[in-house]
Amino acid sequence: MPHMPPAHTDCLFCKIVAGEIPSRKVYEDDQILVFHDIKPAAPVHLLLIPKKHIATLADTTPEDAPVLGHILVKAAELAKEHGCEAGFRTIVNVGKAGGQEVYHVHLHVLGGAPRLGPMLTPPA
Ligand code: 5GP
Ligand code: ZN
């Protein structure tokens, strides 16, 4: 296996990277891993993660820019491959207020429906 940064103990996505927890893998290279979300919110729901543990987008530094850019470009490529030519949505939830549940930065790719629902429900 190529050089791998140490996995964070108790991080679910680090365990998926390490193969300790199974996932439906879509794409992998030395920098990133892509797999299907276990609880899809749309017909296509992919998660793209850096193999390196970074807790949230708010914890990234300029040194992470190449892998973050790689994730965005790969998201567009894989969305097309999964039949989302008509469009798709990307989401990064950040921290408690952002609704983040897994603290290993990830990009959601959602699509495959004729029209996704509204992005956010306005506050009452
Ligand atoms: P967040 O709310 O942190 O942005 O999103 C975390 C996502 O990870 C959720 O959409 C959730 O369904 C997904 N997820 C949680 N546990 C697992 C798992 O064990 N395997 C996979 N493939 N996805 C998971
Ligand atoms: Zn992690």
Image (spheres, helix red, strand yellow):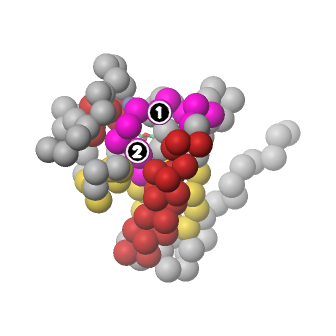
Q: Position of residue 94 (x, y in %)?
A: 61, 36
Whether residue 79 is in magenta: the answer is no
Camera sees residue 30: yes
Whether residue 55 is in magenta: the answer is yes
Of residues 31 and 22, the one nearer the viewer is 31
Disc 1 Cβ-to-ligand 2 distance below 8 Å: yes
How many other residues sit within 10 Å of disc 1, few (<14), some (14-19) or many (≥20)?
some
Location of residue 62 by image quarter: top right
Picture quadrant of ligand 1:
top left
Q: At x 28% / y 55%, what residue is drawn?
A: 29
Q: Position of residue 15 (x, y in %)?
A: 27, 31
Which residue is tagged 1? 54
- Quadrant holding the N terminus: top left
The residues bearing labels 2 and 1 have C-alpha atoms spaced at a distance of 8 Å
- Quadrant holding the C terminus: top right
The span shown in magenta is: 47-60
Q: Amino acid at mark 1?
A: Ile
* Residue at the farthest right position: 124
Q: Amino acid at mark 2?
A: Pro
How many other residues sit within 10 Å of disc 2, few (<14), some (14-19) or many (≥20)?
many
Q: Position of residue 82 (x, y in %)?
A: 38, 71
Q: How many marks?
A: 2
Location of residue 44 by image quarter: bottom left
Q: At x 81% / y 46%, what residue is drawn?
A: 122
Q: Position of residue 2 (x, y in %)?
A: 19, 45
Please indicate whether residue 23 sits to the left or right of residue 72 in the image.
Answer: left
- Helix, strand or loop for disc 2: strand
Cβ–Cβ below 8 Å for labels 2 and 1? yes
